Structures are given as C-alpha cells and as structure tokens.
Image (cartoon, helix red, strand yellow):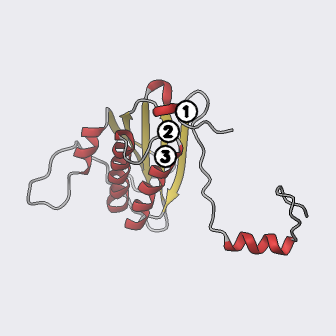
C-alpha cells in the first residue's frame, strides 16, 4: 500500500504502528454558527469526577477557550462540583453519571448538565456551610458562577442538575470543524 507520503507500507506495519501510537483524542471545534456540544458518561467514583472535569477542559480548549480563561475555569469548577455531588449523593451501583456541556455562541453561554441515577437526593437551596465543615459549599459555588441553575427529574430514573454560565465567544471565534 502507498501512503500519503509516497512510501510503500504493508498492512502488518500499519497495524504495528497503530498499536505503538497513543490514542489520538477526537475533538471537534465549534460549528460555523458558534455552537458546540460534549456528551459523555463517567464512572461514579472520585476518579470519574476528575476525569469529567479534565475532559470538559480539554473540549473547551478545542472550542478555543484556553484552560486559564475565565470561561474555562468557571465551567470546570461547575462541572467539578456537580460531578462530585453526583458521585457523593447520586451514586447507584452499576450506573454511570452523565455530563453534557453545550456552548451556545449566539447566546454567549454554556449549559452544563450532570445526570445521575438517584432521584431521592435532590439538591437543596445553595447555602454556605459553617466554617468548621469540610464540605457543603459546592452548590454555593455553582450559584456564584452560574447565571441560573436548577434540577429536574430524568427519565427513566434519576435527576439532572444543570447550570448556565455566561461566556463571551472565544478569542478568534473558536475553531470550526469540518
């Protein structure tokens, strides 16, 4: 077989090269009219929550929002808090949690949704925990960063906690995918 570089390769060499090469992440930029979407499931563990945050930050980079931009930091923190809540309060054995992040360029906002399998523990009004408590500040942080947030039942089971975060279009308009 002749490759794009004009070098002749065998099928066996190509298979060996694929095994040696690390997996290439498949990222997609914003559409030409400024929309982007990420949807993925994660295991309901602390590692799954970290992976969710890292995956979202990586995708935001593909959309043109660098990891140190205000938009990326705000979205990452909201995802981290909602994912941690899904792991701590919405965990159901054998069920993953789901993260969806949509960017609506014309509206200059992100919509973050984290769904888990347990409806019994629904989020309450965000309050600041006492200083001597180790936890209990997540929804307060979400409320500070989001223009609005809430939750809704999820079919067939569970709930979805969502938040909207304002964000101007990325510098350079983001990378459109083809």
Q: Quadrant of residue 54?
A: bottom left
Residue at left 24%, top 39%? 144
Label 2: how many Cα within 10 Å (few below 14, some 14–19, many 20+) = some
Q: Which residue is mark 3?
A: 61
Residue at left 69%, top 38%? 178
Label 1: how many Cα within 10 Å (few below 14, some 14–19, many 20+) = some
Q: Work out which quarter of the rendered image holds the N terminus and state it.
A: bottom right
Q: Is residue 20 left or right of residue 137?
A: right
Label ID, residue 102: 2
Front of the two marks 2 and 3? 3
Q: Which residue is mark 1?
A: 35
Q: Relative to residue 150, is residue 20 depicted above or below?
A: below
Residue at left 17%, top 45%? 127
Q: Label 1: state its secondary structure.
A: strand
Question: Does residue 134 appear in the picture of this structure?
Answer: yes
Q: Relative to residue 85, is residue 125 depicted above or below?
A: above
Q: Quadrant of residue 110?
A: top left
């Amino acid at each position: 077989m002749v490759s794009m570089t004009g070098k002749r390769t065998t099928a066996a060499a190509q298979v060996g090269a694929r095994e040696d090469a690390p997996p290439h992440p498949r990222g997609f930029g914003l559409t030409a009219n400024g929309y982007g979407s990420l949807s993925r499931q994660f295991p309901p563990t602390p590692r799954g929550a970290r992976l969710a945050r890292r995956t979202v930050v990586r995708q935001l980079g593909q959309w043109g929002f660098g990891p140190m931009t205000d938009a990326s930091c705000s979205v990452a923190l909201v995802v981290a808090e909602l994912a941690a809540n899904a792991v701590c309060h919405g965990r159901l054995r054998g069920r993953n949690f789901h993260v969806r992040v949509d960017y609506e360029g014309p509206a200059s906002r992100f919509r973050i949704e984290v769904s888990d399998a347990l409806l019994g523990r629904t989020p309450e009004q965000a309050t600041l925990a006492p200083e001597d408590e180790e936890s209990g500040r997540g929804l307060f942080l979400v409320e500070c960063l989001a223009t609005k947030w809430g939750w809704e039942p999820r079919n067939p089971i569970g709930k979805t906690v969502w938040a909207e975060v304002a964000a101007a279009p990325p510098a350079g308009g983001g990378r459109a995918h083809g």
